[in-house]
Amino acid sequence: MNDVLLTFILIVIKLGLVLGTVLSLAAYMVLAERKILGRMQMRHGPNRVGPFGLLQPLADLIKLLCKEDLIPERADRWVFMLAPAISTITALLAFAVIPFAAPLHLFGRTIPMVICDLNVGLLYLLALSSLAVYGVALGGWASQSKYSLLGGLRAMAQMISYELAMGLAIVPVVMSSQSFSLTAIIAAQQTLPNAIRHPLAFLIFVIAIMAESKRTPFDMPEAENELVAGFHTEYSGMRFGMFFVGEYLNLIVLGAMLTVLFLGGWHGPLLPSVCWFLIKVLGVAFFFIWVRGTMPRLRYDQLMAFGWKILVPLGLLNILVTAAWLLWRG
Amino acid sequence: MPTLIIDNQTVTVPEGTNVLEAAKRLGIEIPHFCYHEALGSVGACRLCAVEFREGPVKGIQMSCMTPAKDGMVVDTGSAEVLAYRAQVIEWLMTNHPHDCPVCDEGGECQLQDMTVAGGHGIRRYTGPKRTYQNQNLGPFIVHEMNRCIQCYRCVRTYQDYCGGTDFGVLGSRQRLYFGRFSDGPLESPFAGNLVDVCPTGVLTDKTYRFKSRVWDLQEAPSICPHCSLGCAVTPGARYRQLQRRRARLNNQTNGHFICDRGRFGYGYANHPDRPRYPLVGHRRVTWQEALAAMQSKLQELGELFGSGSIGLLTSSRATLETQFLTKRWAAALGSDQLCFEAHPRRDFASRVAASQQLDRSASLEDVRNCDLAVLIGADPLSEAPMLALALRQAARRGARIVIVDPRPVVLPVAFERHAVSVDKFSQLLRGLGRPQQGDFSSSMEELGGSLANALLAAQRPLLIGGTDLLGPQGTQALQHAAKACSQPEKPCRTMFMLTGPNSFGGALLSANGPGFDSLMEGMEQGRIKALLCFEADPLADYPDRKRSRAALARLDMLAVFDCAATATVQESDFFFPTTTVEESVGTLINNEGRMQTFEQVFSAGTPLAESASGSHPPRFFTRDIPGSEPQSAWGILSALMGRSADLDALRREIEKNDHRFAGLSQLKANGEGRRIAIPSQHPESLPLNIASSIGSDQLQLLVTETLYGSELLSSLSPCLQELIPAPFVTVHPQDATRFKLEEGKKVLLGTPMGDLTLTLRIEGDMVPGVAIVPRLRGTVLEPLVPGTESLPCRIEKV
Amino acid sequence: MSLWRDIRGTILPFWVTLRYLFRRPVTVCYPERKQIPAPRYRGRLILTRDPDGEERCVACHLCSAACPVDCISMQAAEREDGRRYAAWFRINFSRCIFCGLCTEACPTLALQMTAEYELATRELLQVVCEKEELLIDGCGKNDQYNFYRLAGIGVAAPRGSNPGESPPVDIRSNLP
């Protein structure tokens, strides 16, 4: 009885910690992106609210909360209202299975530093990232706007295409670690991160998650100069804010996935495991921002051709080679 | 029919057409200053030079001076020609001042256009510029001689076309001066046309001075509402203010020009006293309140006294749409007390005029082309000024003009004059109706007979009648005379001067309806309890003002829909502001039966110049335009009848309802209009002519229209106000000696409307035994209305 | 070789952006530091006076005609001496796009642009400027030009007495 209660309390504490960290991280990711992009373009970036603009996320939040919540007259009301929530919640739910530090040994108890260590955690992640498409697609459809609809369509097509490549890139990892559990996958990388063991899979995975997060150079769904703002054209106020936060949450989720699957998770010398995990996630996030500051947007046909004609065959080939190698090594 | 080639295109034109006109037929516009379609060619400006490659003439020639001939090959844009034109422009510009920014012509200046088009930008000639002193040319025209390019258009317009004598060209060589011999107002009532013809800014509109630029003006094709001729005009408005009127080309009516009453009479639309708000019992209310109050009052009266207790009245100022809807509304109310003119004699005269075979009615173009015009009881310059100009054009082509009238008639052309008093008209018309018969019983009949023979002998004969003096019977007699003077191949055309711009429409719609006399009786007997006046002013227009005032005072309800502060508006229980011609769309039918539509120029509202306070326009945000309450009368009627205010649907309905208006929905405002083909039926009974006996110590009182001051709308125009003469009475020298009167002295005129003190004028060129007074609104002469039976009057020294 | 070039072309920009990340920004933190605009900067519009101290504007409507956003409105009027001037002249700076076409169109050099660019306000009517707020006591960029002395219609000085004019013609004379 006592044990169950303790486990429950621990889960609640972990939940609170993860939720708080991830949400504030997402908020500051926005600021970091604006700052870094600004500096890359020889601008200052936001520097008005608080010292170095550090209170900017708060100001943005207040602004978004205070803005009028517009629902287009002919929109599908309920779907319109639901869509941003889907996109935020799926991103948040993904954190349930991500181990963010080494298990903690406290008072004779081993506390796993993951909210829920599912043995099919990887499949859960893949499922959630597929669900995230719904937020975008439904939002685009429900807005009753051409731009939104086109944005939603593009997002759907793009995510389905690149999900395949992403799934194929994960297969070698699962094969080598022989488990779908993320804890097991991290454990298997104690000596050598999967990025080095499966470089091609790593590359495919990086590209695929970039596409999955709808970021430059794959930001076709919200291509400003063609579609105004794509699927969230008609959204305002906090509903738009939820899409926005969802996007940055996604950035962190995908960074965490990359860290867990290919960069050795929380493994690292000297520093505590949770620090290593954060460093790796933030590093990935910085890389994403850097890419955004550097690369132009792809053309839509290039995007699809690249996904289906290059990434998918490469991923399949990679699986074959890896399988053969594993078989040969026994 | 010579055939020639201009810029590689072949064109065949009538004999005598010049090359410039021939090119225009091909859509090639050869630049020109001095040539004008109405004025002809003089070859003064040298700008219309073209190159003749083949044919009877070779080399560079003026296209306006060269008649088209077979075999000509013309190049309008060869390098040599362009260089020639550039040279001409450069010469013209050597003396032209650099004052385009302060010149009112800017934006519609031909010289400006040609200078820019020709590429002349820098003045190479460094010598001094010629300057002139300007003249004060009166209240209409501003003179700035420095801008002159010596095209002679003004002189040709003023002297040749309009018959003015006080403006011409002076000096020689470089010192040509276009002006008067000394300062003073231009005398011709067509002087305003100088503004339109001047290709630069020498002669500009004084009333429009520094008001706007042409590109800022709201303009639309419209119709002049100041007489029954329906001249085509283009009004221009800006900042809710009607700022000017220009002539618009309509070859069938006014041609290129209009009269000064039409050009400068626009001020009524901006009049500060114009009522702009719905009033109930002189209290300002909203439209909804006013309409609801009137509806409930009407319903109450209808229930109490029956539908026959409601009388409706429109006037010749109302559009066809308004008149039609008034008729519809009368039917909906169940009332047959509907009348289209408050002046019964004029009403029936119009009905008679509208009942003749309309292929015999003459347009102004027919007047310009006639070779004999006989005018009976008509004073064109006062009643329909553009008719006078058309008669001048006929006379310039050799036509004979005969005027039979008791008044001292003036025309801008020489004419034959017979001073005949009004009561002899019937004899004259009897003679006129019996050509080629010798048995005349009086000299008047003989005169009529001789005129009739002349009409029979003429190729394009024309009879013109003034309905005011002829009355319904006279109008009818004139029609009979015209029929008698017609031959199958050359009909004697007729033209009648009617009361207002849409008298004809009212006449067509009224058919055998009651005249205003019968409505008046109804009001006096208490049968009619309510009178609804749509743009009508029964107080001022009914000949007997005492009677109309008493009758209107007996009414339970008087509702007035009008755009001007008339006498009736002051007495009204319900008042609804309506739009002017320029502020709405509609159709007017002119005196020859020509349906013409006009478009909306601007939206009604208090002019910014009036509502602005201090040194700038208002500085606040508002959704409401001040003074924008006026609505078109037909729009209000639509609302009252619960219909949608859809003009196209309304016009289609009028067409469908009355086949005489066929083609109405197809009419374009910028076209020539459409003549009504089928006449209305002749009125069954005409009001009797009751001539009152004139005692030996009395004179016959004759009230006449006059150029400025008689017509309601133009008399409200501020710039015409100073031209309205002081009240006067004109008598023959015989009568002056009989009553021992002196020219210029005050006399007392005893009329049935009261005793009036007036200035005396003595005029030899009129019939004796008559005292002629003009109708002058807003003066002591206001109660005297023209177009009545002859009345006796006394005249004595004060 | 083409693949190598593509890879190079993809990688090199990352180096460029990374380098720029550590450069000093070129933008200026505005309210603390204000840049001094060039003399021909297109800022707030003014109405100038001619060397005689009279208003240069003759309300010719050319600026309002040239204005692509219709932010200029005016009404011309006539002074007793025949001089045309603006009875009122209004520029709505909330519409103005500072393109300068009006100053190019101005034939009397009345309308000129200044380098003043701090026009933002919360009160919309404050940027709707009337003639009193636009008119300055000076000639602006040109202190020579006086339109009325060169126009040739004798407003600033009697006819014939302005530069390049001959005395008025005697129309009564028939001498050659």
Image: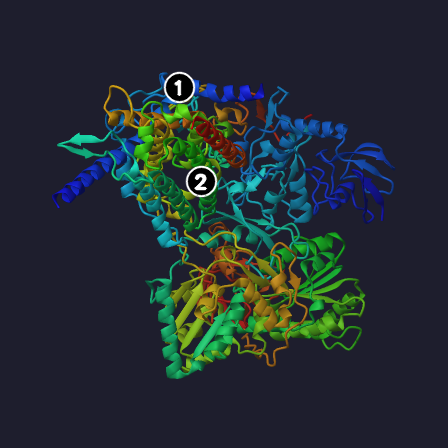
The answer to whether B13 appears left or right of A257 in the picture is: right
Q: Residues within 10 Å of mark 2 (few under 14, many from 20)?
A: many
Query: Residue A159 got which mark?
Result: 2
Tag nearer the camera, 2 or 1: 2
Nearest to the observer: residue C1 or residue B258: C1
The answer to whether B420 appears left or right of B143 in the picture is: right
Q: Residues within 10 Å of mark 1 (few under 14, many from 20)?
A: some
Nearest to the observer: residue B347 or residue C47: C47
Task: Locate residue B781, reporting x and y percent.
Answer: 47, 63
Query: Residue B113 got which mark?
Result: none
Kindly identify which chain the residue marked by label 2 belongs to. A
**Circle 1: element type:** helix
**Amino acid residing under circle 1:** Leu
The answer to whether B724 appears left or right of A237 in the picture is: right
- C-beta proximity under 8 Å, tags 2 and 1: no
Task: Locate residue B190, reporting x and y percent.
Answer: 61, 50
Task: Identify whether B347 is placed above or below B167.
Answer: below
Residue topped by disc 1: C18
CA separation, marks 2 and 1? 29 Å
Task: Identify whether B547 is placed above or below C52.
Answer: below
**Amino acid residing under circle 2:** Met
- Quadrant of residue B675 in the image? bottom right
Task: Identify whether B603 is placed above or below A295.
Answer: below
Task: Identify whether A173 is placed above or below C36.
Answer: below
Q: Residue at x 55, y 65 (%)?
A: B649
Residue with the most extreme front position = A330
Q: Residue at x 65, y 28 (%)?
A: B119
Nearest to the observer: residue C2 or residue C147: C2
Task: Locate residue A82, reporting x and y percent.
Answer: 34, 49
Residue B46 at least partly seen: yes
